[in-house]
Image: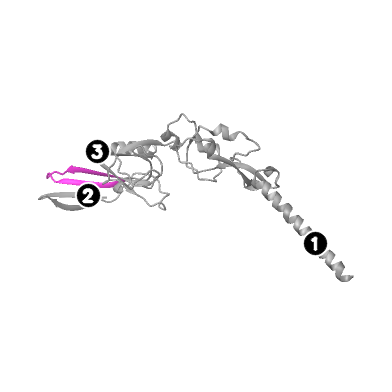
Amino acid sequence: MLRGLIFLVALSAGGGAVWMSLSAASAYSEAADGKNVTQVTGSMEILVAAVDLAPGSLADPAAFRWQVWPKDGVNASFITRDLRPDAVESLVGLVVRTGLIAGEPIYDAKFAAGDAGALSVILASGKQAVAVRVSAENSAGGFVLPNDRVDVLLTTNRPDAAGLNRYSSKVILKNVKVLAVDQMTDGSSDAVVGKTATLELKSAEVEIVTAAEASGALSLALRAMSDNGEVAALQVTEKRTVRIIRGGQLEIVELD
């Protein structure tokens, strides 16, 4: 009799466990299918990038998807399905201002009007784009690419009183962002030997670079990705002189 009672209790407990497991699996399946996700306690749907989006590209419907997100992790700038259910339609045709990776939350500041030029879209507020002449020799062998950071060097040649050529080289700007190389504005990893590099500069820096290019040759020195935080500015250092004989002629090179 006692054994029979124990068997019945064990059978009831097992049945209850199976029922709870099936109920949980059903709820998970509905959530995965996008059903009733807004009713899940402590979560809501936000708009995220469905694929990687490059700066300057046009947004299309396939670029976005709704993603369940914890409520306490929703930033005020995120686009939620509760407040903007038609957000995908309103973003289609806009230009991506800064790059996005798949799964990254979407917000309006990442996009600009579709009739704007790609370069003006990715240009930071208060900055201007200036193109300078480059070659493989003065742009790290063609490895200076869009989104890289560079130092800008000016090299000049002025004969002294004795008629000797005096070359002077100095860094005039540091930690400058490269917006484009020729017509390429994306972050391709392939080396490009371009004819122009477009730099992102402040108004005062534009004057420095324009005057420098008219007075000598500019070179771009590639910086490491981890080397940042410095402010672009004129660099003044103590001059050093090196004497070089080229083709039987004496040249004096000043190094800064």
Q: Which residues are magenta?
A: 153-171
Q: Which residue is mark 2?
A: 254
Q: Which mark is residue 215?
A: 3
Residue 100 image point, x, y percent: 50, 43
Residue at mark 1 to residue at mark 3: CA–CA distance: 89 Å
Q: Residue at x 42, y 31 (%)?
A: 117
Residue 7 image point, x, y percent: 83, 67
The quadrant of the image that shows the N terminus is bottom right
Mark positioned earlier in the residue sequence (1 or 3): 1
Relative to residue 32, is residue 221 drawn left or right?
A: left
Q: Main secondary structure of the magenta part?
A: strand
Which residue type carries mark 3?
Answer: Ser
In this view, the residue farthest toward the left is: 248
Residue at mark 2 to residue at mark 1: CA–CA distance: 89 Å
Relative to residue 167, is residue 58 drawn left or right?
A: right
Contact? badges 2 and 3 (CB < 8 Å): no
Q: Nearer the viewer, mark 2 or mark 1?
A: 1
Q: Secondary structure at mark 3?
A: helix
Establish if 19 lies above or below 100: below
Magenta span includes 167 = yes
Residue 152: which quarter of the image?
top left
Q: Secondary structure at mark 2?
A: strand
Relative to residue 22, is residue 190 drawn left or right?
A: left
